[in-house]
Structure formats: structure tokens, C-alpha cells
Image (tube, rainbow, N blue to C red):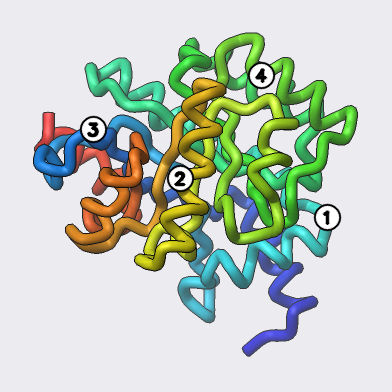
Amino acid sequence: MLSSAQLTRDLRGALAAGDLSIAFQGQYDLPPDVRDVPTAGGPVVLEALCRWEHSTLGPIAPDVFIPLAERGEFLDQVDAHVFSRAAESIAQWRQAGFDVGLAVNASPAHFSTGYADIVMARLEELDLDPRVVTVEITEAPSPQLRPPMLSAIESLRAIGVTISVDDFAAGDTTVEMLELLPIDEVKLDRSLTQRTDAAADDAIAAVVETSEGHGWRVVAEGIETIADLARAVSRRCRRGQGYLWGAPLAVSDMGELLRRRR
């Protein structure tokens, strides 16, 4: 295995050469009644995930290369690259008649007006409706309302972009802290959604009740089984994502799935 320093250099090179690719995983609307749980049909939103195929080591896991980019202080460039490429694919699919939205991840460490400007410029360039785009701000570490971050959120929300707190329960963000954030959606981390104990029920109920009061959507991550799906529905989550519907797919494979489920 190469050293972290060499991997970081290789990652910088892959980013500069445009060799980081995109995979998409679908998010699916859930019905209000567990008896109507769907497992087929098309996704309503596609989350864009970064992938790196190293020239000699093969696939490098995101939980390896994303921290390298963060420590190397170029994760903002990775996020911008992912958004640019993913938005282009979504724009093409929408022009072809597929009614799908886009979700992308953004680290709170660099979430600023500069990132918002990149997003808005790319949306305008592609003529992509901002209302179909969700920016997911990772919850770990807890999102902090720094002035540049708040300004960026307000700019994006003003044009219709949805702001989501991702991986809720993976860090130390509380429901009370969520209420201080100008957001539209909360994504529950798999570490919470896959639990079946009463404490998890209570924790999710608190998020759902607060979300309903503010008009936020609650998305359950980590849906891998029919039992996971039924549990998410019974907990009043309105959208789900996970391997029950399928693994993340390369752009060409996702295009084929959309055509099959049209």
C-alpha cells in the first residue's frame, strides 16, 4: 500500500486529470401506510457519490480518499468536481424526460459563498432547475453556523435549492441544534435507522415531529431489507435510500435503470 502522502498526491493528480468518476444511488418516496410499501418503481432523486479508480491499486474507498482530500485542503475542489459532473448527467436525463432530482454532498468545513457561487453558475450554465437540487451538508462534524456558511445556505435556498443535514445521529448534532439551522431536510444515518430498540424509535420520533413542525422532509438511509423499509414507513419517514433498491451505479448503468423503470 502506498503512503498517505503518495496517495494524496495521486488523488490530486486524478482530480486535475478529471479521473474521479461519479456513481448514483437512488432515493425513493415512501407511502404513509406500511401496507403500501413499494420496492419497485423509479427513484425521485439520485445522490451523486465520488469514485476513484487508482491506476495501480484499483478502487479506493471513499472513506479512505475523502479524508485525504480534507486533510490536503482540497475537498472543496472534489465536491465542486462531483457537483459539476453530476449536474450535467441530471440535466441530460431531465431533458430526455426523466423526472429525477440531484443530491450532492458538501463538507461544512468549506461550505461558503464560493461553493454556492459554483453551484449557481453551473445550474445556470446547464439550465437546470435549482428546485430539483439538494445539497447535503454532512452532520459529522456538526454543522456550525459560521457567517460564510449561513450566507451560502441563504443564497442557495433563495433560488430554490434544498438544504439537507446528512448522516444525522452519526455525530453529536441534537434535535435542538437542527432547529437553529435554515434547512429543508434531515437524513437519518443508518446507525439509527437500522436499530429496532425503543430508544431509536423515540429518537426518530423526536426528529420526525420536529421536522413536521418545520416542514422538513425526513429521509431514512441504510434501507437494506423489507423490514428496514417497513420500519422507516412506520416511523413516518417520507423518503428512503439503501441497498434494498440497489447499489450505487455508474452513470451509464443508472441511465439504463431509468429507461427500464420509465
Q: Is residue 136 left or right of residue 187?
A: right
**Left or right placement of residue 92 versus residue 185 in this view:** left
Taking 51 as reference, is 100 above or below it? above
* Res 78 visible: no
Quadrant including the N terminus: bottom right
Name the spot of residue 187 as percent of width and height, x first: 50, 44
Question: What residue is at 52 percent from the left and 42 percent from the top?
Answer: 207
Look at the numbered disc 4 and give the secondary structure of its residue: helix
Quarter of the view holding residue 84 = top right
Q: Which mark is residue 156?
A: 4
Residue identified by numbered label 2: 205
Badge 2 crowding class, 10 Å Cα cut-off, few under 14, some 14 to 19, many 20 or more, is some
Residue type, numbered disc 3: Pro
Mark found first going from the N terminus, 2 or 3: 3
Which element type, helix, strand or loop, lies under badge 3?
Answer: loop
Q: Nearer the viewer, mark 3 or mark 4?
A: 3
Mark nearer the viewer, 4 or 1: 4
Label 3: which residue?
Answer: 32
Contact flag, marks 3 and 4 (Cβ < 8 Å) = no
In terms of depth relative to the viewer, which is nearer, 25 or 151?
151
Dot 2 or dot 1: first in sequence order is: 1
The first of marks 4 and 1 along the sequence is 1
- Residue occupied by mark 1: 73
